[in-house]
Image (cartoon, rainbow, N blue to C red):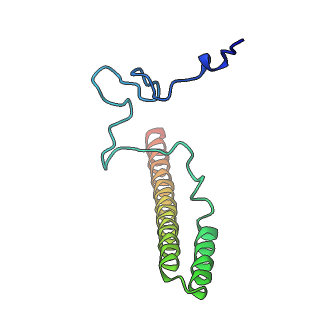
Amino acid sequence: MSNFKNNNRRGRFKPNGDRSFRRNGNGHKPNGEFSNGSAFKRRHPGKNNQNAAKLVEKYNDLAREALSNGDKILSENYLQHSEHFSRILISQEISRIHNVNESEVDASNQIKVETKNKETEDTTSK
């Protein structure tokens, strides 16, 4: 007696109606407009970047260990990873400073507007 368990297996290749690539009518992906000025946001922001300092330390340690074992190529690879995460740290610091400065400017502008409004109210009430 034959057992037909394999009849319900998925095919080896995906069919033409690949569901992971949905087109919006004009042949482009829905979010496919990534230019330099676009507001691109990651799905999980900070997932890799939140521990950038730890990752820099980790890859520096791995590079040091690889170099002590005599593997210069692996050591260089780890140093490149470390450099990547140190650049992420620098960009995070720059954006944090920019946001702090921007909020200080917004606060000072708000104080100026409130002061002008109060002066206007005082002159109209006289």
Q: In the orientation shown, which residue stands out farthest toward the front?
A: 1
- In which quadrant is the N terminus drawn? top right
Q: Position of residue 107 (x, y in %)?
A: 51, 55
Q: Position of residue 21 (x, y in %)?
A: 41, 29
Q: How many marks?
A: 0
Q: Is residue 20 left or right of residue 63?
A: left
Q: In the orientation shown, which residue stands out farthest toward the right?
A: 1
Which residue lies at the image location 31% right of the left edge and 50% below the top edge?
36
Q: Is residue 95 left or right of residue 24?
A: right
Which residue lies at the image location 44% right of the left edge and 39% below the top edge?
124
Q: Position of residue 48 (x, y in %)?
A: 58, 56
Q: Is residue 84 left or right of residue 4?
A: left
Which quadrant holds residue 10? Answer: top right
Which residue lies at the image location 53% right of the left edge and 82% below the top edge?
71
Q: Is residue 112 depicted above or below 74 in this figure?
A: above
Which quadrant holds residue 9? Answer: top right
Q: In the orientation shown, which residue stands out farthest toward the top?
A: 1
Q: Position of residue 85 (x, y in %)?
A: 52, 67
Between 44 and 13, the one nearer to me in the picture? 13
Q: Is residue 117 depicted above or below 12 in this figure?
A: below
Q: Is residue 44 depicted above or below 2 in this figure?
A: below
Between 123 and 32, the one nearer to me in the picture? 32
Q: Is residue 39 left or right of residue 114?
A: left
Between 3 and 124, the one nearer to me in the picture? 3
